[in-house]
Image (cartoon, rainbow, N blue to C red):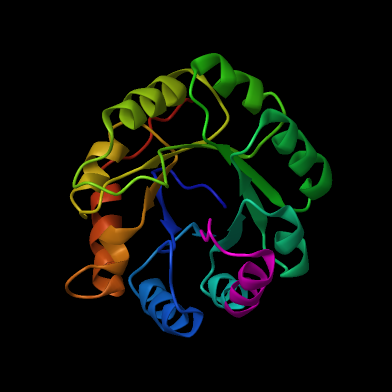
Amino acid sequence: MSFVNRPRLFLVTPTRFEPGKLAIELKAAFQGGDVASVLIYMPSASSKELQAAAEQLVPIIQEGGAAALIYGDTQVAGRAGADGAQIETSLEDVKLAVESLQPSRIVGAGGTKLKHEDMEWAETGIDYLFYGRLDLPEKEDPHAKTIARAQWWADLFETPCVALAGNTVRSAEIAAETGADFIAMKDAVWQHADGPASAVAAINTILEDYPFEDEN
């Protein structure tokens, strides 16, 4: 997950998908422009199912120039050759992920409820903090708590953060206004009427309008 002087797109897969079909959609999405990373999000899948999907999708994600991340399973991340994992279960699990995956792989964390938890989790050395509930149905706009927490974090701390937008392309604007380093989107891309490439292109056009302030 490299950085440019504006927010970058952080794609999240649908909760349920057929890997072969999603592989085609992923290839199309990369035709739309810049994608920083893709989180393979299969919270209800068995380790075997997650492994099978990751083995098919990770190479496509990496060929597209993005970081392939596995939700909730560092072992699958390692076996599938992914670039990292996102952990949301506990502080101890995050610490274990940092120990087992870094420095060669990315460790992201999310699922915190309180600001002091954000700071504790960031102190473990994670590569990013994810704001937003992936387990809730998406709405048109980002959740107000997601926006407030991402803005607070982006204003004060160096650890990069990801802000989960809503299920419309337009919602990327609201998320980008927080100053978050990455804007996470799911249904806005996969359910776009003109296809994922059009969605990615439109989102990147929006994100170009939110350059980060030069600290020098």
Q: Is residue 46 magenta?
A: yes
Q: Is residue 29 above or below residue 139?
A: below
Query: Which residue is most to the right?
Result: 99
Q: Looking at the picture, how far across and down is residue 6, in whole percent?
A: 39, 43
Residue 168 colored magenta?
no
Q: Name the chief secondary structure element in magenta.
A: helix
Residue 48 drawn above or below residue 180: below
Magenta span of residues:
41-56
Q: In the displayed structure, does residue 18 sit left or right of residue 74?
A: left
Question: Which of the 4 image quadrants contains residue 136?
Answer: top left
Give me the residue at 42% from left, 47% from top.
Answer: 134
Residue that appears at 24% across and 53% down: 167
Residue at x 33%, y 71% (from the top left corner): 32
User: Which quadrant of the view contains residue 151?
Assistant: top left
Q: How many marks?
A: 0
Q: Is residue 202 visible?
A: yes
- Residue that appears at 26% across and 59% down: 188
Vertical position of residue 176 compared to residue 190: above or below: above
Can residue 208 be seen here? The reply is no
- Farthest residue in the top direction? 116
65 or 175: nearer the viewer: 175
Q: Position of residue 199 (x, y in %)?
A: 25, 65
Left or right of 68: which side holds 13? left
**Residue 159's spot in the image, x, y percent?**
58, 30
Residue 129 occupies which quadrant of the picture? top right
In the rendered image, residue 186, in percent from the top left (x then y), is placed at 35, 57
